[in-house]
Image (cartoon, grey):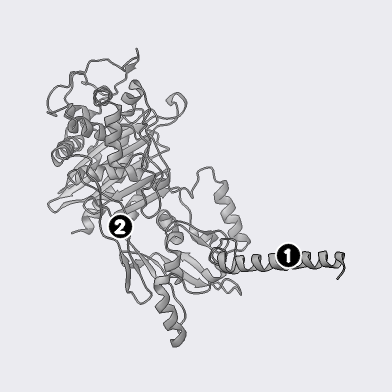
Amino acid sequence: MNKPLRHIAIFCGLLVLALLIRDNWIQYVRAGELSTHEKNRRVTIERYANVRGNIIVDGKPITGTVDSKDPFYKYKRTYANGPMWAPVTGYASQAFDANQLEKLHDGILTGNDDRLFFDRTLSMFTGDKKKGGDVVTTLSAVAQKAAFEGLGDKKGAVAAIEPSTGKILALASTPSYDPSSFAGYHNKDAKAWQALENDKDKPKLNRALREIYPPGSTFKVLTAAAALEYGKVTDINAATDTPEPYILPDTTREMVNHARGCENATLKYAMEVSCNSVFAKLGHEVGRDDMVKMAEKFGFNNAEIDTPVRAATSVYDKNMDRPQNALSAIGQFNTNATPLQMAMVAAAIANDGKLMKPYMVEELRSPDLDVLEKHEPEEMSRPMSAKTAQLVQEMMEGVVNSDHGTGGSAKIKGATVGGKTGTAQHGELNKARPYAWFISYAKTDNGSPVAVAVVVEDSNAIRDDISGGGLAGPIAHDVMKAVLDSKK
């Protein structure tokens, strides 16, 4: 063989070798990755080739499946009262993939999870069609309905938790959307999706889990807990030695009070009427590092709070100066929290200082109803002692029941209710319309079955804490009452 032919033969051999290596790399090394890649159309076709399992609330499905009469995507997802449940279910779309529970438990719902291997194998021999399993939630239909209807056409969110277990009872977000409107892959689905994408009110945003807000005066319950836990206050009925006006540390700036009688007020009275000066002073006395420590015990600065849908990170700044820490102690500066986070704060207080990890999936079940996975309640932390929690409860119950308290709209006959109002200022120079907040819990003789956080973004509230009680408080009342009535 002459030299040119030998070079050509070697080059062709190298090409064949490279092709063999590449082919084996794709078929064996990357096979798993490519078989489940989101751009692999076969994955989507497989997802909708069989009847999809359901997401269950109170023993009833809130999702469904219909024959789409399509040669490629045989079945299409449907939703019962889609806008109300969208913050829980998410969506499953032939064109736009899936999110939230629909995405996280896609393997169970499609029947492709390894734990359903026996069911798939058995169906091959019996001739039965492959089916997906079910996702059983902790949600309460009556609580969700009360939350969704209470928000109405207002922009906002509600989170409700069972304090003793961490079960999420309601997650509502408005404005919302109907996941059924883009469940297919035709032009009308694309138009519905694009309309939602272009909507300035962001209806696809899950405000209960994924939006953070300045918590305003609702944060004062955490500051009160820190002051008690770290020994800055020992008697909630003793004067706090707070001047009027109170000057923020290291500044000449006066802390503005919207309530009367804050000079030298007791901690209990300061909570009931929401004295900014008292809590700013206590936050300063506790100090930034201990305030951070207390906030983090409640879940702030934790980027991995999964429900199993991951919540946005609530923030208490670790690097503030002293005046900024005083402002943060009343829920301002750059303190931010999700509605879920503030429901967790109320739940830990109601549960005598024990914070349970929030969750909204009770069980994963096979198509024949065998339990594949069951969630057990799990303690997340103990932010405070039982004694401290009970003192904070006493103050929160004063907010609702005292003549001058700002949370009277949350009272429920036959139940003990504690709450805290808040109006969170935000925007440039705090000129934007304030957010109205209310956090609360309802206790009965059998314990505390529900803790709630409500935030309303587009309120017409005036700039004081009473607005939280007037706008968000009634929504919290209706959610708590719905849960209490369902327990009778």
* Crowd class of label 2 (few under 14; some 14 to 19; many from 20; radius 10 Å): many
Q: Quadrant of residue 68?
A: bottom right
Task: Please determine whether, in this image, residue 185 is positioned above or below residue 158.
Answer: below
Q: Position of residue 114 (x, y in %)?
A: 42, 71
* Crowd class of label 1 (few under 14; some 14 to 19; many from 20; radius 10 Å): few
| Residue 256 visible, this orientation | yes
Q: Quadrant of residue 11?
A: bottom right
Left or right, residue 429 beside residue 140: right
Left or right, residue 226 beside residue 29: left
Q: Which is more toward the observer, 23 or 160?
A: 23
Q: Position of residue 21 (x, y in %)?
A: 65, 66
Q: Position of residue 469 (x, y in %)?
A: 29, 36
Q: CA distance from mark 2 to mark 1?
A: 69 Å
Q: Position of residue 483 (x, y in %)?
A: 25, 54
Residue pointed to by mark 2: 142
Task: Please determine whether, in this image, residue 122 is positioned above or below residue 322.
Answer: below
| Residue 421 visible, this orientation | no
